[in-house]
Image (cartoon, grey):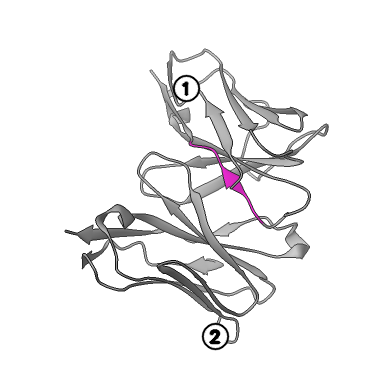
């Protein structure tokens, strides 16, 4: 079993829809939960991160962490074709010097 | 946000030659830099971690004599692929973090290496 599980998709939704992307994990020591967006043939871009449990909102993006369920989510409201990309979750903790443990990435397609 | 550059963005080389890839942090001092490799439709695979002024730490299965990493300054790390072979063809990405925010990694745009 991988430390971080993420459905690779692809996930295809119409423009304007609310998108929900998720990851589950097994290591309860994880403290930081990151979401990266990666366009084709580009490096990942840090979208947002959450420390421990709770919600964090940034514009159309909301990140949620439920440590009791070992489950994290990224919600995208009013999705746009420009949001089409691969979204990777990553997690880290102090004991491993914050080395990122990655999910497989979910390919998201927003249809105009 | 923090900016990391990589050069070159694409390189084609002949089998048996060596290729150097540069990674620079443009607006912060990167005490630690990471080198990743990414195959098509796969996630990132960490190759090595380098701290400024120290020898790099390589992940299991990564040949340190083949992938030479140098982190000579707080803004520059280099990855040299020595005696490249077609199976080394891949997308190589670096990332960097500074001492104040150890949990944040900022990524370069990546380098696509093709070995013919």
The quarter of the displayed image where residue A31 is located: bottom right
Q: What span is colored magenta in the figure? A: B104-109
Chain of the residue that carries numbered disc 1 in the rendered image:
B
Magenta residue check for B68: no
The quarter of the displayed image where residue A105 is located: bottom left
Q: For marks 2 and 1, give the CA distance.
A: 45 Å
Chain of the residue that carries numbered disc 2 in the rendered image:
A
Q: Which residue is found at the position 27% from the left and 60% from the top?
A: A80
Q: Which mark is residue A112?
A: none
Dot 1: element = loop
Residue A34 shows in the view:
no
The quarter of the displayed image where residue A94 is located: bottom right
Q: Is residue A54 above or below residue B93?
A: below
Identify the residue position indicated by label 1 in the image: B85
Q: Quadrant of the C terminus of chain B?
A: top left
- Magenta span: helix, strand or loop, mainly? loop
Which class describes the residues within 10 Å of circle 2: few (<14), some (14-19), or many (20+)? few
Name the side, left or right, on which B52 lies relative to B76.
Answer: right
Magenta residue check for B106: yes
Q: Are marks 2 and 1 in contact (CB under 8 Å)?
A: no
Dot 2: element = loop
Instruction: Say how many tags the image has.
Output: 2
Which residue is most to the bottom? Answer: A68
Report x, y in % for residue A2.
52, 66
Report x, y in % for residue A91.
60, 64
Q: Which mark is residue A69?
A: 2
Report x, y in % for residue A96.
74, 60
Q: Is residue A31 above or below residue B48?
A: below
């Amino acid at each position: 079993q991988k430390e971080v599980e993420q459905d690779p998709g692809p996930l295809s939704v119409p423009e304007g829809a609310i998108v929900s992307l998720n990851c589950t994990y097994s290591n309860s020591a994880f403290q930081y939960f990151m979401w990266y967006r990666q366009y084709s043939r580009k490096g990942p871009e840090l979208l947002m991160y959450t420390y421990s449990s709770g919600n964090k909102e940034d514009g159309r993006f909301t990140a949620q962490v439920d440590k009791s369920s070992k489950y994290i989510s990224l919600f995208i409201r009013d999705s746009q074709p420009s949001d089409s990309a691969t979204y990777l979750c990553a997690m880290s903790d102090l004991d491993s010097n914050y080395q990122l443990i990655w999910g497989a990435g979910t390919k998201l397609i927003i249809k105009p | 946000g923090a900016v990391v550059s990589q050069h070159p963005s694409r390189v084609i080389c002949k089998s048996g030659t060596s290729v150097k890839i540069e990674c620079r942090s443009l607006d912060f001092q990167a005490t630690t830099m990471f080198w990743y490799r990414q195959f098509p439709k796969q996630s990132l695979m960490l190759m090595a971690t380098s701290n400024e002024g120290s020898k790099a730490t390589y992940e299991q299965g990564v040949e340190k004599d083949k992938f030479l990493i140098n982190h000579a300054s707080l803004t520059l790390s280099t990855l040299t692929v020595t005696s490249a072979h077609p199976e080394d063809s891949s997308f190589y990405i670096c990332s960097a973090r500074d001492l104040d925010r150890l949990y944040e990694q900022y990524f370069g745009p990546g380098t696509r290496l093709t070995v013919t």
